[in-house]
Amino acid sequence: MASLYFYYSAMNAGKSTTLLQSAHNYQERGMRCLLFAPRIDGRYGEGKITSRIGLQADARVFERDADLFASVRDDVAQQPLHCVLVDEAQFLSKTQVLQLTLVADELDVPVLCYGLRTDFRGEPFEGSQYLLAWADRLEEIKTICHTGRKATFNARLDGTGARVLEGAQIDVGHHYVAMSRKEFGLAEVQGYAPGAAPVSRGDDRAG
Amino acid sequence: MASLYFYYSAMNAGKSTTLLQSAHNYQERGMRCLLFAPRIDGRYGEGKITSRIGLQADARVFERDADLFASVRDDVAQQPLHCVLVDEAQFLSKTQVLQLTLVADELDVPVLCYGLRTDFRGEPFEGSQYLLAWADRLEEIKTICHTGRKATFNARLDGTGARVLEGAQIDVGHHYVAMSRKEFGLAEVQGYAPGAAPVSRGDDRAG
Amino acid sequence: MASLYFYYSAMNAGKSTTLLQSAHNYQERGMRCLLFAPRIDGRYGEGKITSRIGLQADARVFERDADLFASVRDDVAQQPLHCVLVDEAQFLSKTQVLQLTLVADELDVPVLCYGLRTDFRGEPFEGSQYLLAWADRLEEIKTICHTGRKATFNARLDGTGARVLEGAQIDVGHHYVAMSRKEFGLAEVQGYAPGAAPVSRGDDRAG
Amino acid sequence: MASLYFYYSAMNAGKSTTLLQSAHNYQERGMRCLLFAPRIDGRYGEGKITSRIGLQADARVFERDADLFASVRDDVAQQPLHCVLVDEAQFLSKTQVLQLTLVADELDVPVLCYGLRTDFRGEPFEGSQYLLAWADRLEEIKTICHTGRKATFNARLDGTGARVLEGAQIDVGHHYVAMSRKEFGLAEVQGYAPGAAPVSRGDDRAG
C-alpha cells in the first residue's frame, strides 16, 4: 500500500531541496516521478521547482481546479510511475488533497507533499489543513529562528523589514521570515489577550 | 523553552493509557501535573480520565468557554507545575489551543495534548485543526485497522454495526471503529467521485 | 511487507504499558499476537509481562539460545498470526535480532520490540545495538529526568540510593533511575576527561 | 539545552544535501556553523563536503584521534557558535562521539551528525553504534530500494556490478548501492541459516 506523506516546515527550511533530492533518488534508481507545482507560485518561472541553493527540475503546473487524480491515473495508464511529488502543497484545494489520497490508495503510487502549515497570520492553509488531517505520515523539515529556537511560523515583512499583519493569504510580493511561535507572537497576531476568568473550580479535582 | 505536543491517533489506539502513563512518570519523579478533560466526554463519569485497559486518574473538567491559560497561570502562581496533559483534545476550541500555546511559551510549562485528528466524516475537529497547525511536535500513537493496515480514521456505527454517515460531529451514543483511510472510504464519505478531466497539458513539462 | 520496530526508551518510561496496549489493540480487532519475554527478567514471575501501572499478559519466555524465527514459523504454520511483541528486547542476542528480521521479511509478520538503549555504564546492550542498526523504524518512548530534561540513560543505585558504577551488565538486584545524559554524567562514567589537543589546524578551512 | 542529533540513512539518500541545507539555513539567519568531515572520505578532495546534486561547502577535516570537544571549545572561546555539523559521522571513534555529547551538554551547542548505520556486511560502524546509543534524537533520511521498498542497507559492488562480501570496512574504491534489508539479504550476509529448533514449549503460555 502506498502512503501519502506531508513534509511540513516553515519558510526557507529547504522543502524544495528535499523534494528535488527525493526526485533525484528515484530517478537514479531507474524509477519515474511526476513533479507537480501549483500555478500560484510564480517565483522562478512556470514549470520549474527551484530551491534557494540552486537546484531545479521541471514540474507539471496545475490550476486550482485541476483534477490531480485523473492526471496521475492517465499517466499511470501509459507507463509505470513510482512517485508523485507536490511542491507548495499548502496551495492545494481540499478536493485536490482528496484526489491525492486516491493516488495513494487506488493507484498505489506514493505521494510526497511539501508545504507550509500556516500563513502570515498563523492560519492553516486549505491544503495544509487537509494534509495534516489525512496524510499517512506527517514529517517535519526542521529549521531555526534567528533566536535559535525551532522556527514553525512565517512572518510577512515589507520592503523595509517591518512586520505586515494585513492582506491576502497569498502574496508573493512580500518577504517572509521563519520564526518561532513566541517570536512570531501568535496570540497577539490572532488578537487574543490572555484573560482572567479561571476554569470553574466546581469541577476541580486534579490530582 | 517548553513545548506543545499533539499526540494524535485514531479511536481506541491507547491515547488515554499513554496520557495516564506520562502523568504517572511525572508524579513518580516528584513532579506535579495538571490533567484536563473537556466536559463533553461523559463516557466514564465527570472528572476522570479512564483508559479502556483499566487505568484512571482525576482531571479538571473544563467547559468550552473556559480559559485554560488563566487556569494554569493561577495554579502556577501557587505551586510549581511540571506538565499539563489534555485528554480528548480534539474538543478544544481554537481559543483554547491558543491558550495552551501560551502555557508553553509564557509559563514555560510543557503541554501534552491527546486526541483524534478527524471525525466520522473525515473532517478535522476544531481543536485538532489548530493543534496540527500550531503544536511544536506532532506525534502519532499508531494503531491498526482490522485489515492490518494502519488505522487513521474513525467510522461511526449504530447498534447493529451498520455505518452511520449522518448526524452531529459529537455523538457519544454511537460506537466508533478505527479504520484505514481506504477501508473508511474517505473520498466516498466526502462525496467525491473521481473525475475525468486531466490537468491542462499545456503546462506539462514533467521530467 | 511487514516491518521491524524498535521502541526504545529509558527505564520506567512505560515500555511494557505501551506493549500491552498494542497487544490489546490487536486482540480487540480479532487479530492474534505472540508476546515474548527473555528469561532474564524475573521481576514479576516467569511467563508474564507486567507494567508498573498494573497491566499484565502472558508471554512466551525464551532462553538466550532460543530460535525465535523457528518458534514463530512453527506457530504461523498452524494459525494466522498478526503481530509479534518482544519485551526487554535489549536482552536479545545478535542472532535473535537477525531471526526477528526474518520474521518480518520472510514470514511477513510485524515485530514490535521494546527495550532500553544502554546499560548503567552507558554501553549499548547487544540486542539494542543490533535493533538500532537493523530495525525498519526507531521510535522513542519519551520520559523525563527529575531535572525536567528528557531522560535517556539509566543509572544504577544501591539500597541507600547511592550511584553504582561497577558490576555485571544485567543485575536485577539494584534499583535503576532514568536520567538525562548530563545528569547521568556519561563522559565521566565512561572515564573520559575532556582533553586539550585541538584538531590539527592545517586542515582548518571552516566557513 | 542543546541536543545531539543523528540523521541516519542508507547510501545516496541525500545526507550531505541535507547537511548543506541546514548549514545554509543557519548562515542565512546570521548564525555561525562549524562543519566537520573525517579525513577518510577523500571522495571529492579534502576540506570539502560535497553532495551528489552539486552543492559544496568548506569543512574542518579531522583525524581519527582528533579531540572534537577541544576543537569546538577553543572555537567557542573566540566567537559565538550556533551549530556543529558532522558529515560521514559513521567514521567517528567512540571517544569522538563522547566528545560531541559534551559539545551539546557542556558547551550548549547543537550537534547534527549525518551518517550510515551499517557497513557492507550489515555491521554497525563504531561511530554509528554510539550515535544510535547516545544521541538525543534519531532521525531517518528516507530513501528507496530499486524494488520500491525503503532502503536501509548498503551493498558493496565491484566494477562489474557484482556483489562483494569481503574486504575492509572502509573502502572507497568500490561502488555502493542502497537496498532494502530483504534485497540486501542480511541473514545470508551474516551467515545465518534459519534453524529448526523451536523455543522450549515448557514455557509456552502465550495468550
Image (cartoon, coloured by chain):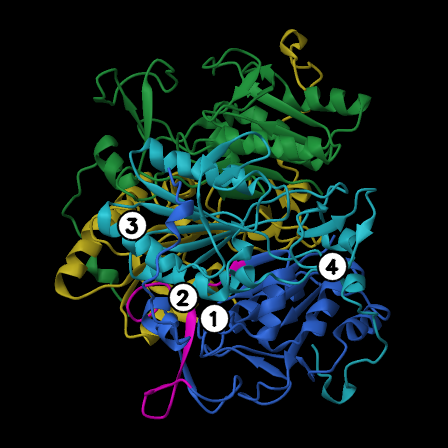
Chain colours: A yellow, B green, C cyan, D blue
Vertical order, C182 against D73 (above or below): above
Q: Chain of mark 4?
A: C
Q: Identify residue type, mark 1.
A: Gly
Magenta residue span? D139-165
Q: Position of residue B197 (x, y in %)?
A: 16, 48
Q: Identify residue type, mark 2.
A: Thr
Res. A168 in view: no
Pointer 2 with pointer 4, Cβ within 8 A: no
Cα separation between marks 1 and 2: 8 Å
Pointer 1 with pointer 2, Cβ within 8 A: yes
Asked if badges 1 and 3 are on one and the same chain, I answer no
Vertical order, B135 against D163 (above or below): above
| Pointer 2 residue | D143
Query: What's the residue at 71%, 73% (across, down)?
Result: D96
| Pointer 1 residue | D14
Query: What's the residue at 66%, 66% (across, down)?
Result: D27
Q: Identify residue type, mark 4.
A: Gly
Residue A92 drawn in magenta: no
Q: Residues within 10 Å of mark 2 (few under 14, many from 20)?
A: many
Cα separation between marks 1 and 3: 41 Å
Query: What's the residue at 78%, 86% (across, down)?
Result: C201
Q: Is residue A43 left or right of residue B56?
A: left
| Pointer 3 residue | C75
| Pointer 4 residue | C167
- Depth check, front residue: C122 or B2: C122
Q: Is residue D27 left or right of residue A66?
A: right
Q: Position of residue C34 (x, y in %)?
A: 37, 45
> Going from the N terminus, do you reach mark 1 or mark 2 first?
1
Q: Secondary structure at mark 4?
A: loop
Q: Identify residue type, mark 3.
A: Asp
Q: Residues within 10 Å of mark 4 (few under 14, many from 20)?
A: few
Cα separation between marks 2 and 4: 42 Å
